[in-house]
Amino acid sequence: MKMTSRKMAETIKERLKHKDWTSHFDREKDQLRVEDDTTKKGMTISLPGIIAKWEEKKDAAVDELIYYIEEALTVMNVEQELTGKEKGIFPVIRSTSFPVESSDGVLLIHEEHTAETRIYYALDLGNSYRLIDVKMMERENWTFSKMKEMARFNLRSLQTSVKEDHVAGNVFYFLNANDGYDASRLLNDTILDSFHKKMEGAMAIAVPHQDVLIIADIRNDTGYDILGQMAMSFFASGRVPITALSFLYENRELEPIFILAKNRAKKEEEGK
């Protein structure tokens, strides 16, 4: 059976019908919006990524999504305090297309990162998380610098799990601890510096979705193509996609690989 966005939307609606929530399928955007009937707070789900996971994991992918929706909407409708939960505050990386306001119009705490990514801050609640907004900060009388320092300290304290793969003479490292902060490890300079020291070629990085960070030792031109294909594949199947673009890492700076490729082509053209 071919799974379409409409079929997937109907499957999700059926699984959530016992809740006091309303679901609306947007055919043009390939999205499903799920909202609490009382508060009107909710979440928007991009269906193509869910379908890609369903094709791989079938019903397990839907079970995982339903659990995620139920946890997220339940948490969303409970007022959260930060004081006493300082160790549960972490930075999270999102796409620049990710909203900068909550569903009820409150500004989410964020800062710019690259042309493709933005940094937000989350309160970990065990099975889910809550993005920190301006109202939460004001209630606690916290400054942004205080919260950012806490979040970066907590990030550095996380254990890191790494898998290594060799393809066509290049080495790929996958950081995948499945704690919700794999992509966030891109902000841990200690980790990146330790990888940089053992590179034989160029160091490239991809953060296709929140649950993986790919670090690559690119030793030949084929490596760029392989990393690009990996990033696209992961991006399509991630629950929280970030970017399919890869970056070169040098001097603690990230530069999109396609920009470098364009510049290189331009220089070659000028040199003729």
Image (cartoon, helix red, strand yellow):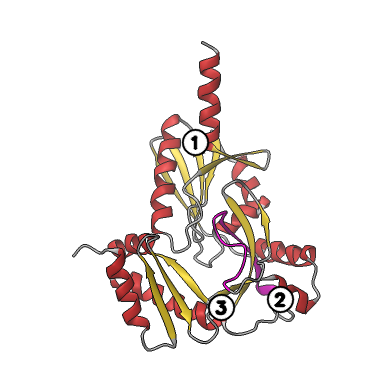
Residue toward you, 213 or 100 = 100
> Residue 166: which quarter of the image?
top left
Disc marking residue 218: 1
- Structural distance between the alpha carbons of marks 1 and 3: 37 Å
Disc 2 vs disc 1: which is toward the camera?
2
Residue toward you, 23 or 252 = 23
Residue 97 is inside the magenta segment: yes
Q: Is residue 200 visible?
A: no
Magenta segment boundaries in residue numbering? 87-103
In this view, 147 is above or below 173: below
Residue 219 is inside the magenta segment: no
Sequence order check, earlier mark of 1 and 3: 3
Confirm or deny contact between disc 2 and disc 3 (CB under 8 A).
no
Q: What secondary structure is marked by label 2?
A: helix
Q: What secondary structure is marked by label 3?
A: loop
Quarter of the N terminus within the rendering: bottom left
Disc 1 vs disc 3: which is toward the camera?
3
In this view, 114 is above or below 5: above
Circle 3 is placed at which residue position?
126
In the image, what residue occupies the spot 49% across and 72% down? 43
Sequence order check, earlier mark of 2 and 1: 2
Circle 2 is placed at which residue position?
136
